[in-house]
C-alpha cells in the first residue's frame, strides 16, 4: 500500500534523494509553467492539439521552421501582385496561425484573405478591387512583421520547454533508482497504480541469470 511504500523509501533512500511532495514536479506540469507571450496564446494552441504538449510543440516547431519559405512565397506573390496565389497563401497562414495560438496573426491574415477574395472575384466592382488592393498594400508589411514576432515567440516557448525539461532529468533518474530497488517487492499492478514509466518484464523473474529486468515501456 502507499503507506508501506513511503516507509520503505524513507528507510532505504539516501537523505539527499528525499523531497517534500511539493518539490516533485511532473514533466508536463513543468512544461505548462511558461510565461505569457505577446503574440502567442499557448492555451489556445494546446486546445487545438487536444491538450497534448508534445503534439503542440511538434506543430509549433514545424510552423516556425516553415516560416522563411512561406514568407518568401507570400512576399513574391505580393511583389508580383499575384493576388490569386497571395490569397491562397494568406489563407493557409490564417489557419495555421490559429492552430498554434497566434490569434492576432490569424485575424490579420483573415482580413487580408477577405481583401484578396474581393480582388480575384468576378462579382466585385473595380472600385472594390482597388480598395482591397490598397488595403493589402497598407497591411502586408504589418502582417509579415507580426509573422516574425509570432515565430519568435514560438521559438522562445520551445526553448523554454527544453530548459524546463532539463530540470526533470534528476527526477527521472531518481524514479529509475527507486523503482529498480523496489520492483522485486512490488506487484506489477502496484507499478501501474503509481503511473511508473517502468514496467516489469515478468518473464525476467524466471531468468536465473538476471533476476530482475526493467523494460523502458512507455506505452
Image (cartoon, helix red, strand yellow):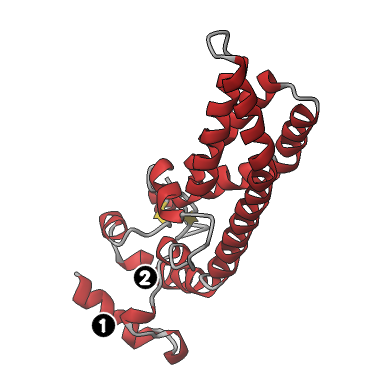
Against 5, residue 216 (above or below) is above
Q: Residue furthest front?
A: 127
Give the residue drawn at x 56%, y 20%: 118
Q: Is residue 82 left or right of residue 168?
A: right
Task: Pinpoint residue 94: horizontal percent, then vertical percent.
Answer: 54, 35
Asked whether 16 or 137 is in front, the reply is 137
Task: Pinpoint residue 89: horizontal percent, then vertical percent.
Answer: 64, 28
Give the residue drawn at x 61%, y 31%: 90
Q: Which residue is mark 2?
A: 182
Q: Earlier in the sequence, mark 1 or mark 2?
A: 1
Q: Quick one: SS at disc 1?
A: helix
Q: Quick one: SS at disc 2?
A: helix
Task: Pinpoint residue 49: horizontal percent, then vertical percent.
Answer: 43, 42
Disc 2 crowd, CA 10 A, few/some/many (<14, 14-19, 20+): some
Count of picture labels: 2
Against 214, residue 90 (above or below) is above
Task: Pinpoint residue 48: horizontal percent, then vertical percent.
Answer: 42, 41
Q: Residue 15 lies in what quarter of the image?
A: bottom left
Against 16, residue 65 (above or below) is above
- Residue 101 visible within the image: no
Q: CA distance from mark 1 to mark 2?
A: 12 Å
Q: Which residue is mark 1?
A: 7
Q: Is residue 177 left or right of residue 23?
A: right
Q: Residue 93 lies in what quarter of the image?
A: top right
Give the residue drawn at x 72%, y 32%: 74
Amino acid at each position: 500500500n502507499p503507506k508501506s511504500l513511503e516507509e520503505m523509501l524513507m528507510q532505504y533512500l539516501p537523505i539527499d534523494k528525499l523531497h517534500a511532495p511539493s518539490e516533485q514536479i511532473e514533466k508536463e506540469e513543468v512544461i505548462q509553467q511558461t510565461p505569457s507571450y505577446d503574440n502567442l496564446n499557448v492555451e489556445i494552441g494546446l486546445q487545438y492539439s487536444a491538450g497534448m504538449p508534445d503534439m503542440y510543440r511538434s506543430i509549433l516547431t514545424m510552423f516556425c521552421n516553415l516560416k522563411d519559405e512561406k514568407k518568401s512565397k507570400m512576399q513574391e506573390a505580393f511583389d508580383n501582385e499575384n493576388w490569386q496565389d497571395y490569397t491562397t497563401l494568406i489563407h493557409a497562414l490564417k489557419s495555421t496561425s490559429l492552430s498554434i495560438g497566434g490569434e492576432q496573426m490569424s485575424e490579420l491574415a483573415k482580413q487580408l484573405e477577405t481583401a484578396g477574395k474581393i480582388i480575384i472575384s468576378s462579382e466585385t466592382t473595380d472600385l472594390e478591387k482597388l480598395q482591397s488592393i490598397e488595403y493589402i498594400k497598407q497591411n502586408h508589411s504589418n502582417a509579415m512583421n507580426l509573422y516574425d514576432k509570432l515565430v519568435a515567440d514560438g521559438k522562445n516557448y520551445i526553448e523554454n520547454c527544453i530548459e524546463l525539461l532539463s530540470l526533470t532529468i534528476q527526477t527521472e533518474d531518481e524514479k529509475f533508482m527507486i523503482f529498480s530497488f523496489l520492483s522485486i517487492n512490488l506487484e506489477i499492478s502496484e507499478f501501474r497504480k503509481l503511473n511508473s514509466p517502468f514496467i516489469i518484464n515478468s518473464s525476467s523473474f524466471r531468468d536465473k541469470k538476471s533476476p530482475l529486468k526493467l523494460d523502458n515501456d512507455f506505452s
